[in-house]
Image (tube, rainbow, N blue to C red):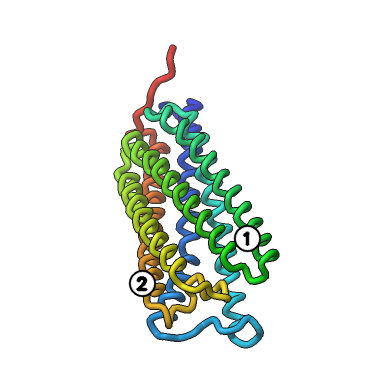
Amino acid sequence: MPKTDSSYVLATDGLIGIKKYFLYGMLAMLPIIVLALMSSFVGITGAIIVESVYGGPTLYILIIITIISIAALVFAALSLLGLLFGLRDIRRSNLKSVDLYSGASRNLRRIAISILILIALYYVLLIFALISSGTGGTSVSVISFIFEIILLAMAILFAIKLASVYKNLSKDISQQRFNTSATLLIVSVIINAAAEIVTLISTALSAPQNNPYISQGLSTSQNPVALVINIIFLIEYILLTLHFYFGYSASKNALTKLSRNIGIPAVQPPK
């Protein structure tokens, strides 16, 4: 694959986009891990971080939590853009699995857009439910349960499609770390699904909390089940961070090989 070939340029640009996906993914996981550590610390020590949203140290803690959450969302959005643009270029190159990349690119884009629409719809319905019933109650719980199940199923589908891309990239550009990244992704998704299901069951069996931060597990001193769930989620986040790290390393090594024009098998265009 000569460096002047458009396929070389597209493969390089695609890997640059995928490298950004892994890099921003790692950065997105760091604030999430911080929140998970805060949750676990609260549960283990028996401290109560969230008591009121009015003044005092609590207000500063909520501001910090909000800033951390926004940072995670920004990096996650940049990560997703890097993935979609990277796959767009990869599927136009002459790597061996170009047909798979083309199909995966379309499917991942559709799933990502569907997830965003569902999240927006979820918040709209949630706001209407809160307005109509005052504090929410049963309608809010039902809406949350239904949408969380749907979003969990779509996230699993997204991860499976993504893992198939990694495995084929591993073959096409001889980077075993893409395989490792795929394995870590699947394991983290399995752990996430188990933790989410336990969370939903636990929430359905317990009385709804008035404070949204408490219901998200930031005060688990009186709820050992929530503490265990938080620790499980923390393990998942660490595995996801390792998944991003190995993918970033594989992308970086692949770009080095491309720059030297060695070890990247390609399908020649038809004459």
**Residue 57, x across and y down, in percent:** 59, 86
Q: Please, is residue 271 above or below residue 112 in the view?
A: above
Give the image location of residue 192, x and y in percent: 39, 58
Would you say the residues marked 2 and 1 are in contact, meaning their CB atoms lie under 8 Å apart? no
Against 2, residue 85 (above or below) is below
In this rendering, the label closer to the viewer, 2 or 1: 1
Q: Give, as a three-letter code, the residue at label 1.
A: Leu
Q: Quadrant of residue 210?
A: bottom right
Q: Residue furthest top?
A: 271
User: From the viewer's perspective, is residue 43 above or below residue 142?
Assistant: below
Viewer can see residue 256: no
Q: Residue 46 is drawn in which quadrant?
A: bottom left
Q: Is residue 240 visible?
A: yes
Q: Amino acid at mark 2?
A: Val
- Furthest toward the bottom, the residue is 56
Q: Residues within 10 Å of mark 2 (few under 14, many from 20)?
A: some
Q: Which mark is residue 228?
A: 2
**Location of residue 160 in the rendering, given as x and y in whole percent from the top left corner:** 39, 43
Q: Quadrant of the N terminus?
A: top left
Instruction: Indicate the secondary structure of the residue bearing disc 1.
Output: helix
Residue in view at x 45 percent, y 45 percent: 158
Checking the image for residue 83, the label placed there is none
Which residue is painted at 39% across and 67% down in the image?
234
Ranked by sequence position, the earlier of labels 2 and 1 is 1
Residue 68's quadrant in the figure?
bottom right
Q: Which residue is mark 1?
A: 126
| CA separation in Å, label 2 and label 1 | 27 Å
Q: How many marks?
A: 2
